[in-house]
Amino acid sequence: HLAPVNMAGENWVDEGGFSKQLTLSSHGIFGLLKGLDPELGENSFVSSVSAMDGRHGNGGERFNSLAAGAAGVLKSYSHERPDIRCRAIDLHPESIVEAEECAASIVEDILCHAGEVEIGLDRDGRRWALVQFAEDLTGKRRKLTKDDIWLVSGGGSGVTAAGIIGVAEASRGS
């Protein structure tokens, strides 16, 4: 799966073309994972590589939804298949000039480092991890009512389904 290389880290002008390309790209990586899934075992690994800013778009002005979409699909897949090593690597664009060194860093990260799925490799070689953490509920928990309406976006299986099923079960009878 490759998002168009000439679009990496660039601002989009044509909103219609962007939306279509984002859909094709995300569906492309999803289709690949779906097709490969039965063949992947516990010693397998899957990775996406982008070149936004070495921090998944959080460190600069090079955010690209195509690359972020691939990382998001891969992160969801990692929750569905915890037996597979999944890694979404974002490189600083300046680091890709040294192709051999860059490739070695990618391979090392995929094969030698455990831990978080979303990893950034900065131009100076520093390794960054995007980490999720739970926060305590600050307000009073309330059940859904029959008049509440939820719009749920996602794949409808795995993480999305588990979350919505949990909400529905917790609100049963209300």
Image (spheres, rainbow, N blue to C red):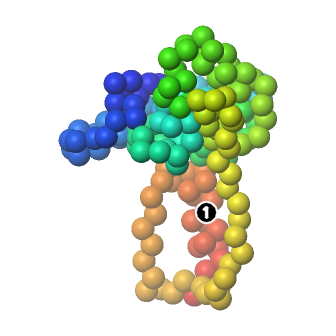
Would you place residue 47 above or below residue 118 in this image? above
**Left-right relation of 131 to 20:** right
Question: Left or right of 88: which side holds 25?
Answer: left
The front one of 44 and 100 is 100
The percent coordinates of residue 53 (x first, y second) are 51, 37
Q: Quadrant of the C terminus?
A: bottom right
Q: Quadrant of residue 22?
A: top left
Q: Quadrant of residue 103?
A: top right
Instruction: Report the residue at 68% width, 34% height from top.
Output: 126
- Where residue 156 appears, x then y in whole percent? 51, 53
Closer to us: 58 or 82: 58
> Where's residue 171, x and y in %?
61, 80
Q: Nearer the viewer, residue 140 or 6?
A: 6
Type of the residue with mark 1: Gly
Q: Secondary structure at mark 1?
A: helix
Rendered residue at 79%/35% (across/down): 114
Q: Which residue is mark 1?
A: 163
Residue 20 position in % (x across, y down): 28, 40
Give the left or right position of residue 30, taking residue 120 as reference.
left
The answer to whether residue 148 is left or right of residue 91 is left
Q: Quadrant of residue 90?
A: top right
Residue 50: tell me if it is visible. Answer: no
For disc 1, the neighbor class at 10 Å (few under 14, some 14 to 19, many from 20) is few
Residue drawn at x 55%, y 14% as measured from the top left: 98
Q: Residue at position x 44%, y 24% from top?
A: 2
Depth order, front residue of 125/48? 125
